[in-house]
Amino acid sequence: MRDRFGVWSLGLIASALIYGCGQPEGPQKRQAGSIVRDLIVQGSDYRLTNFSDAGFDLIYTDGFESEGEEKIHQNRVKILWPVKLPAMSTWKESVEPTVPSPQVRASYDAGNVKVIVTTGDDIGSPTSGYVCNVEVIGSQTPISVKQDPRILASQGHDRNNPDTDRTYTFHFRSGLVPFVTDILQTSEKNSVKIEGAQIPSIKLIGPPADAAFVEKTTSIVARAVSRPQLPIRKNGFAPFGLSNSLYFGHTFWDMDVWVLPSMLFLQPDAVRSMNRYRLDRAAQAEKNAAEFFKKPNSGMMFPWESSVTGKETVRASSVKEHHISGSVLWGLNLSEQAGIASPSEVGKVASGVARFFENRSIADVSGREIKDVMSPDENHIGDNDLYTNLLAQWAMNGRKWDGPTKFKLPKDANSFLTYDNDNERGYKQAAAVLSIFPLQYPPAEKQARVMMERFEGKVSKNGPAMSDAIHATIWARLGEKEKAYDAWKRSWEPFVKGPQMLFSEKRSSERTYFYTGAAGCLNTVIYGFAGFRFDDKPLDGAVWRKKLKSGWWLSCKPCLPPKWESLMINPMIIDGQKYRVEITPEKVTIQPASGS
């Protein structure tokens, strides 16, 4: 439950004043306002200052609460003008480089032709499209622009040589950013091939709506987590990003448990930034725990709703959602397994979270208990939530399921339950089945079919858009292709709005873009349909497996929907190496990507 009491808004209002030293005039002022409106759509106080030929500073406020008193925190970020800068890297003709962020500057050499790509004065707003400037220099034949439905508008300008040097500006439809080679063509069949920029992509051959949703969603989420102007390590990543002011830009478990896994293989640099956000606030988490327990050295207590300071920003019952500390550790641990988080730094957080759960629980003959806690089923506050207690047991046993510390895990003769006194009448969102995925708790996985049949149909239709993605992933891992596909379709079809398939949090809401729900659907594609899985040993029945540098195993055991002919992930970055993954019902091909 995300309470909205007494919290200062992160962001700005569309008609805010621009002031400060070096205040711009005319076109520059209008351009600055346009850029900032795309960065943060709604909210409260901000100002622009320190204008120069390179860019300007954006100063905005964020809020937190301390001892019942509202306080504000001021943030400053540098915004660069969307102008052509020196080339970032040079590539040969056959290379299709990955765009790491929505405003990247790069050059590509293709024989005697140089293509310079400069993206962005939109900077990642999924509703208003995407601008790309392209310079083509030195082509031996005239260049023309293809007709393409993805292009909202385009302009071409002669350079020194009207036949060989051209500059193009394209305004792409949101989420539909094609390769430059898709839209530029030379007038001779055998002329040099022009390569362009590529964003991480997941593509499938199957029902057109499925293919469009997956491609658009991958593009939007991958760009949103990679904005250099507002790095996650400093600002965190909210359920809606900064697309609206609903959650004030604050960070929840959504980032650690939902968004992070979806980008683990697609945008590892963004995941590093997510890890940095949590690691840099570990000291504040220690202060939070000391204040909560009223004694020093009480472990690390990460806030349910974190501001840029790492302090808690809610007053009401959501503050009892204490699984958050375990969820933060879970995301860091996943990153460590993938080789993109420091084991020593994660180990310090693991020790701190273990101490927190030791202080938060009480010993009992049936196992340690955590009382008066809010479940992921946020309609319930009670004792011994399954998901929370499992994270506590795992943390206190050194991030292992087996160990000397045992917690009470609610269950009856048939299976695990969601919490003590679970009446099974209904749940706001998936809760008990989180023990199956993402936690992969072995006893729960053995009961997966029973638990799914018991809990899946009891999740509220008015809940947030994450539950059916969890259900779909579990069904796929059980080999239930039809059930997995049906659940996955339910996880996004009722929630997307308009031709651009923009994601809302609830079926009845028109507010988009809900990155948590979108990332959950991508997780089903990666960890369910494609069948990738982390374990401390190879997965039985896997068609592909690789031991990672961390010592963990990444296995692949696909379960493609019957209506899908193929699924391709390109590039999928594993241990720093780019791979091209192609899965069909007959085979799995995982090989180094071109140019990696």
Image: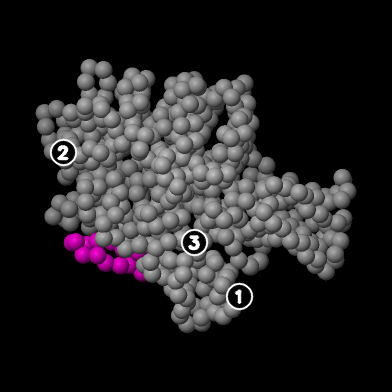
Residue 1: x and y in percent read: 29, 45
Residue at label 1?
Answer: 27
Label 1 amino acid? Pro
Three-letter code, disc 3: Leu
Work out whether residue 397 or residue 379 is closer to the camera in this orientation and state it. 379
In space, the residues marked 3 and 1 are separated at their CA atoms by 19 Å
Identify the residue at image location x=83%, y=51%.
186
Proximity of marks 3 and 1: CB atoms separated by less than 8 Å = no
Residues rendered magenta in the picture: 62-74
Asked if residue 71 is among those painted magenta in the image, a careful observer would answer yes
| Tag nearer the camera, 3 or 2 | 3
Circle 3 sits on which residue?
39
Choose the circle earlier in sequence order: 3 or 2: 3
Q: Are marks 1 and 2 in contact (CB under 8 Å)?
A: no
Give the alpha-carbon distance from disc 1 to disc 2, as whole Å.
Answer: 59 Å
Task: Give the crowd class for mark 1: few <14, some 14-19, many >=20 residues within 10 Å.
Answer: few
Reading the chain from its start, which is encountered first: label 3 or label 1?
A: 1
Residue for point 45% across, 75% down: 17
What is the quadrant of residue 211 in the picture? top right
Q: Residue furthest bottom?
A: 21
Query: Which residue was labeled with disc 2?
Result: 371
Q: Amino acid at mark 2?
A: Lys
Tally the marks: 3
SS of the residue at dot 3?
helix
